[in-house]
Amino acid sequence: MASSAKLDGVREAQTRKFSKKTKNQVDESELLTVPDGWKEPSFTKEDNPRGLLEESSFATLFPKYREAYLKECWPLVEKALGETHIKGSLDLIEGSMSVCTTKKTFDPYAIVRARDLIKLLARSVPFEQAVRILLDDMACDIIKIGTLVRNRERFVKRRQRLIGPKGSTLKALELLTNCYVMVQGNTVSAIGPYNGLKEVRKVVLDTMKNIHPIYNIKTLMIKQELSKDPELRVQSWERFLPKFRHKNLSKRKEPKKKSVKKEYTPFPPSQPDSKVDKELATGEFFLRESVKKRKKMEEIKAKQAEALSKKQQERNKAFIPPKEKPLTKKNAKAPSEGKLDIQAIKDKVKKAKTKKLGAPPVMPVQPTSSTTNKKKKNKTKNKG
């Protein structure tokens, strides 16, 4: 009885441990996934009732062409900053904007958002889009692209490729990432959620590295469709995403005649053999003068005989008759009488008669009474 009670106690302990493990596993998996529609609670005055200890301020310069627009929309900027108790000032003489905290400011991160707001306004972003940065779930990213490409013409082409024809590529990127993207000069300003900004930065940097933005847009479209399926949310998406490879189409043409460089040697080339050295090598140096002259004459006669034979061959070429082509007899087969189409020949003759070819036929003149009498008299004379 005691042994059975011990066994039951061990089993219960094991089941408890197993249940604890499963509970822990479930908790971890729940922590990894963010529930749909979840939103972080906003920061209120109750979270920081005493305010800030020190005053913080930020300032930024803006170009001259932006002065008129900022002067027009600055009351709206002050109103938007006033909701978070931040003071903004516009200095047109110096050409700068500045923001600073006040005693009523309770949100410590509000000054950072205000700094981003004046940065975006200086980068030619309209106020309607720039003011969205003051929201909690919004962020901004200013990507500097001016130093990524050395050649200016190439940089302009790639920047235009990012915008696309009539801004179509930029619009597609905005729809897929839920971000506002502004390409201006040497920077790209983007406002939107953090995930979208990450994708925008990747597309912009890849475009500057000569990767067409359409490839990244295609992958983003596929990812958007896959995220709708709850089963595929946990799985890897590598099998669905396209893999683009670089193709070096323009290969450098190699020259027909390649000049091979000789190996460098520090020593100068050896001197050519003199006439005496050559005679010593062949043994002619030790011969008599008469023998040398006889040998030279023989060489000259051999050369003359060779030249004469070549000339004679060229002269004889004119007397060689050309090769005649063999005559080939053509046996013209006469058409058989049985196969003649008589009706077709008749039709051709009729058609030929109807056609008016050449000059019009001369009409015969009708003989008059006087001419007929003369002809009769002539006939009678001839008879007589």
Image: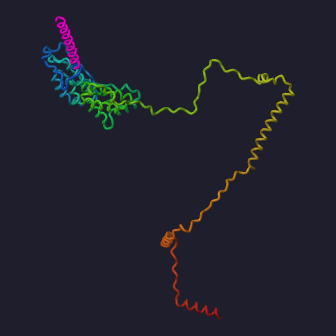
Kindly tell me whether residue 125 is visible in this rendering.
no
Camera-side residue of 333 and 29: 333
* Magenta residue span: 1-29
Q: Picture coordinates of residue 34 (x, y %)?
A: 21, 22
Camera-side residue of 19 and 69: 19
Q: Picture coordinates of residue 18 (x, y %)?
A: 22, 14
Secondary structure mostly taken by the magenta-highlighted segment of the chain: helix
The outermost residue toward the top is: 2
> How are the colours assigned in the image?
rainbow
* Residue located at (41% from left, 29% from top): 151
* Residue located at (57% from left, 30% from top): 258
* Residue located at (13% from left, 14% from top): 50
Queried whether the magenta region covers residue 11, the answer comes back as: yes
Camera-side residue of 295 and 274: 295
Q: Is residue 182 left or right of residue 260?
A: left
Placement of the C terminus among the 4 image quadrants: bottom right
Q: Picture coordinates of residue 13 (x, y %)?
A: 19, 10
Camera-side residue of 25 and 304: 25
Queried whether the magenta region covers residue 115, the answer comes back as: no
The outermost residue toward the bottom is: 384
Placement of the N terminus among the 4 image quadrants: top left
Q: How many marks?
A: 0
Q: Is residue 47 left or right of residue 277?
A: left
The outermost residue toward the front is: 1
Q: Quadrant of residue 242?
A: top left
Kindly tell me whether residue 199 is visible in this rendering.
yes
Q: Picture coordinates of residue 348 (x, y %)?
A: 50, 69
